[in-house]
Structures are given as C-alpha cells and as structure tokens.
C-alpha cells in the first residue's frame, strides 16, 4: 500500500513537472512575441534596397581610393551608418546593421578592386607611361573626381607594385605572371605603411617619377 502511494506520488510529480515545463514554454513564446513587437528589426537587416544603400555606396566610393581594403573596427563607417539610420528613420538595432554593412562593404570593395586591377593591367591603356596624377585620375575615375595627396600615395603604392612585379605593359613578358595580385599588393602596402621614415613619401614619389621617365624611353 505504501509503495502504491509512493508510486502515485511519482505520477503526480511527473504531471506537475510537465505542467510547469509547458507553462514555461508558453511564457517564453509570449515573451518572444512581445519582444518582436517592440523591436521588429532586431532579427536582421539587409543593406540592399534599404534607404541607406545609395548614400552608403557613395561613402564607400569616396573611401576606397585611400583604403583599398576595409578596416575593422572602422569608427568613421560606424558614425556614418548611425547618421544615415537617423536621417532615414530606420529603427534597426545598430550592432545588427553594422554587421550587415561590414559584409556589404567587403563585397563592394572586392568589386571596386576588380575594376581598379583591370585598368592597371589593361591592354589598351599604358598606365606605366602616365604621370602619377593622371594615373590616379584614370584608375580611380569611377570613385572620385578629385585627386588629393592621400590618393597620390595610394597610386604610388599601386604603381610601384606593378613596376616591381613587371605588370606594366612594356615590362610584361610573354608568359603571364603568376601571383595572387591583391594578397601580394596588400603585403607590399603594409611594408610601405610600416616604414617610419618621415620622408618616405617624398622618396617614393621621386623614385616613381624617375621610373616613369625611364619607362617612357623603353
């Protein structure tokens, strides 16, 4: 009889436990619904076709000629996105938006680099014979009309890389050069950026201008 009562107690406890678990499940679902009602955009955000896409692309185009590669964290990009969200009345969770924006920016920069590379390695254009300002305007024409000192510096990096790797039109051999263009270019850029010589840009510009002179005589 005692065993029977004990077993009956077990059954009641099991029923009670199931009931508690069911109530917890229902409560969780209700909380989830309320959370979604309060902030419908926290689950995801897509840059494509959103109100911030067009101004974001303009910002990325402006930054590309002085960056080439996205940086993380990018405080300027974060500030820009914050302003764009407020300006366009987008009520989305900032960390969620920033994740989406970073992925979008990375894809855009890949596309921008492909366009830049095709001009540098063009069969029609001989970029090796161009002066630095003209070269900057040529390779970055889709991104900016103005050529400033920062853009000239990036142009020096690109031209010096193409010169040293024999990628300029008159320097190319019959066999195509085998290299991972952007991986090696990034390493080349990092070496220059890490050089702490205060006169490095003057020296690099003078060297590239001499190379252009010699190139024109080939």
Image (spheres, grey):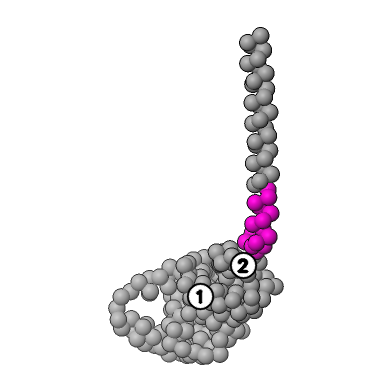
Element class at badge 1: helix
Q: Which residues are magenta?
A: 29-44
- Residue 53: give x, y in percent of width and height: 64, 75
Q: Is residue 34 magenta?
A: yes
Rendered residue at 67%/24% (across/down): 12
Judging depth in this view, the residue of 111 and 99 nearest the camera is 99
Image vertical order of residue 93 relative to residue 112, above or below: above
- Residue 202: give x, y in percent of width and height: 34, 86
- Residue 86: give x, y in percent of width and height: 59, 76
Residue 189 appears anywhere in the view: yes
Q: Is residue 39 magenta?
A: yes
Q: How many marks?
A: 2
Q: Please give the residue where the numbered disc 2 appears in the rendered image.
A: 92
Judging depth in this view, the residue of 84 and 214 nearest the camera is 84
Nearer-N-terminus badge (2/1): 1
Residue 123 appears anywhere in the view: no
- Which dot marks residue 79? 1
Element class at badge 2: loop
């Amino acid at each position: 009889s005692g065993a029977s009562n004990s077993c009956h107690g077990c059954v009641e406890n099991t029923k009670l436990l199931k009931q508690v678990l069911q109530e917890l499940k229902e409560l969780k679902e209700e909380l989830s619904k309320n959370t979604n009602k309060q902030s419908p955009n926290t689950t995801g955000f897509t840059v494509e076709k959103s109100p911030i896409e067009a101004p974001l692309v303009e910002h990325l185009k402006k930054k590309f000629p002085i960056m080439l590669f996205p940086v993380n964290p990018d405080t300027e990009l974060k500030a820009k996105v914050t302003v764009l969200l407020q300006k366009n009345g987008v009520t989305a969770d900032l960390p969620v938006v920033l994740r989406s924006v970073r992925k979008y920016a990375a894809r855009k920069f890949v596309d921008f680099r492909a366009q830049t590379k095709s001009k540098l390695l063009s069969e029609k254009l001989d970029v090796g014979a161009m002066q630095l300002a003209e070269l900057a305007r040529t390779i970055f024409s889709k991104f900016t009309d103005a050529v400033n000192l920062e853009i000239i510096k990036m142009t020096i990096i690109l031209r010096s890389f193409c010169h040293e790797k024999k990628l300029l039109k008159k320097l190319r051999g019959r066999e195509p050069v085998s290299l991972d263009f952007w991986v090696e270019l990034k390493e080349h850029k990092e070496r220059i950026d890490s050089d702490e010589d205060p006169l490095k840009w003057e020296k690099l510009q003078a060297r590239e201008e001499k190379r252009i002179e010699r190139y024109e005589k080939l």
